[in-house]
Amino acid sequence: MEEPGDLHKREIALESLEDAAYIRHLAFPYMSALYEYITTVKTPLHLYHSSALYAVPDADIMENKIWEGSELLFDIDADKYEGCNKRIWICPESGEAYDTVLGACPQGEKPVEYLSLPWMCIVKAWNSALRLVDVLEKDFGYSKIKIYFSGNRGFHVKVLDQEVLQLGREARRAIADYVSCNELDLDTLFPAYRGKAVFRTPEYGLRKRVLELAMKRGIIERRRVKELEDVMLVDLEYVKAILREVCVDVDRAVTMDTTRLSRFGNSLNMKAGFKVTELKRDIDVDRLRYECFSPFKGTLKVKSLVTGGVDVLDTKLNLVRGNIYRVEAYIGVYMVVKGLALPVDFNELEVRP
């Protein structure tokens, strides 16, 4: 696993594999002590460290931890994009899958909601993460930024610059609002002349990004407006369309939270069975697939809990409840943790070195 900076000042938390207990307020002076705990005391299904630094990280009352600062976090989920929120509702008793929202199953039990998320949706979230990093660097001057595949359905962006540590909740909220263009006052930010936003050079921040994209697409008009020479005009409808591309939808609650827990890099996210992985900005995410983030190889035999056609990652499966299927390891693990199947035979399942 990746060791976060100042480990000894961070609260450690985990969800136990053995009994599903959620254990918080742990602290370890170094990684070897943490490894000893998770190999001899509690095996983590999920393993977290605080984004905050504390003087007493293992205090069981938050006020007694004595907060010393927090990293700045952003969460980008891939299910917010068009075509990326396909869901089915599964009735546990019969295993029947429905593509419409169910309040209750025919047998009366509560249906299980399952999200289908093809890799192309992860690519869309990646492009948003790159835009976010560009804003954080150019508009805020931050330089120590990491992007992590969350191991499930999106990306976590962490700003580690010293300057962000003392930011309060309202400052973090303002940053989240800025990057996402939340509650944007178009009339003030883009004053218009006869239905067209007026630009001049140099521009800065959001106005600069809108102008650059408009120039790249050749949708600007140069003219004199009243006493101003060489003014650039962009139709307000084009401005609104560009804003939908340059603004980044982030989870504001995550960014505002100064006590947020964050997954360890290179740990497993057992909501999906994939590793939390740092990605460099020059990587070609289009060429990757979910299986690249799986620590498992080989095959896994599973017993289906579902009847019907189900999209599992980028694979279409026609399943019958009770039937046993041999599938690739990463697909089988995903089916099990998502409640689509039960494991039957692990003999052909291997862990990558």
Image: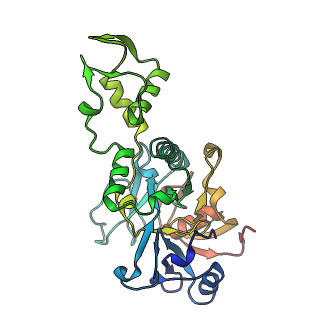
Answer with the quarter of the image where residue 303 lies: bottom right
Question: Does residue 334 appear in this view?
Answer: yes
Identified at 43% across, 51% down, the residue is 79
Along the viewing direction, whichever of 160 and 15 lies nearer the viewer = 160
> Can I make out residue 304 in this image?
no
Query: In the rendered image of this protein, does residue 115 appear above or below residue 105?
Result: above
> Residue 108 at what x, y percent from top left?
28, 71
Residue 340 place in picture, x, y as percent: 49, 66
> Looking at this rendering, what residue extends furthest in the right direction?
353
Nearer the observer, 2 or 22: 2
When the figure is inspected, residue 234 is found, relative to residue 249, above or below; the finding is above
**Residue drawn at point x = 35 percent, y = 27 percent:** 239
Residue name at image x 59 percent, y 63 percent: 274
Count of numbered tags:
0
Give residue 201's quadrant in the image: top left
Spot occupied by residue 107 in the image (x, y as percentages of width and height): 31, 71
